[in-house]
Amino acid sequence: MHLEHLAIAVADLDAALRFYRDVLGLTLERVEELPSEGVRVAFLPLGESHIELVQPTQEETGITRWMAKTGGGMHHLCLAVDDIRAALARLSAAGAELITPQPVARPDGTLYAFIHPRSTGGVLIELYQKSQPTSP
Ligand code: ZN
């Protein structure tokens, strides 16, 4: 298991990049528009992980409501696991509250699921299983 990414919700992606890239000195790998999720995401590698800057592009999504309440900031961290179904079964058996009890597939085949902050000490945690695991 390793930290896949850490997501920070921002109102203005370009303004955020002026800090994270231009001032802090991280490298911008790419920016993706994800209309199906209502967000625009910048990927900034950091060791084996990366920071994702997430800007909502639609009203009435979970992240928009969260930002209206909190003003934005650190939104979730994501842990890459080898077997997401086994991880979810273990969490569920232990009584953890799962936002997505079954993994959801992204267009690239990556599976993801979210664990509610009520079960994690206040942090939204995403689990990730890449489509093609490097080890059998
Ligand atoms: Zn994420």
Image (spheres, helix red, strand yellow):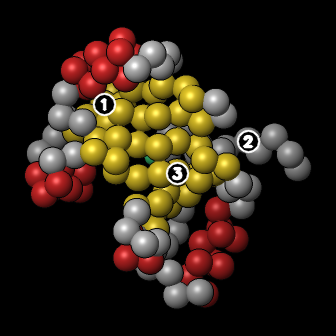
Which corner quadrant of the image does residue 98 belong to? bottom left
* Amino acid type indicated by mark 2: Gln
Check the image and report above or below for 130 versus 35: below
Q: Residue 78 carries which label?
A: 3
Q: What element carries label 1?
A: strand
Asked whether mark 2 lies closer than 8 Å to ligand 1, one says no
- The residue carrying mark 2 is 132
Q: In this view, does 90 lie to the left or right of 77?
A: right
Figure quadrant of residue 39: top left
Q: How far apart are marks 2 and 1 (CA)?
A: 25 Å
Q: Residues within 10 Å of mark 2 (few under 14, many from 20)?
A: few
Q: Which amino acid does label 3 sit on?
A: Cys
First of labels 3, 1 by sequence position: 1
Identify residue for label 1.
Answer: 40
Q: Which-is-in-front pick, marks 2 and 3?
A: 3
Q: What type is the residue that disc 1 sits on?
A: Arg
Which residue occupies 59% across, 53% down? 79
Q: Earlier in the sequence, mark 2 or mark 3?
A: 3
Q: Left or right: 69 with respect to 36? A: left
**Residue shown at the point (42%, 35%) measured from the top left:** 52
Question: From this viewpoint, is residue 90 visible?
Answer: yes
| Cβ at disc 3 under 8 Å from ligand 1 | yes
Extreme residue in the top direction: 22
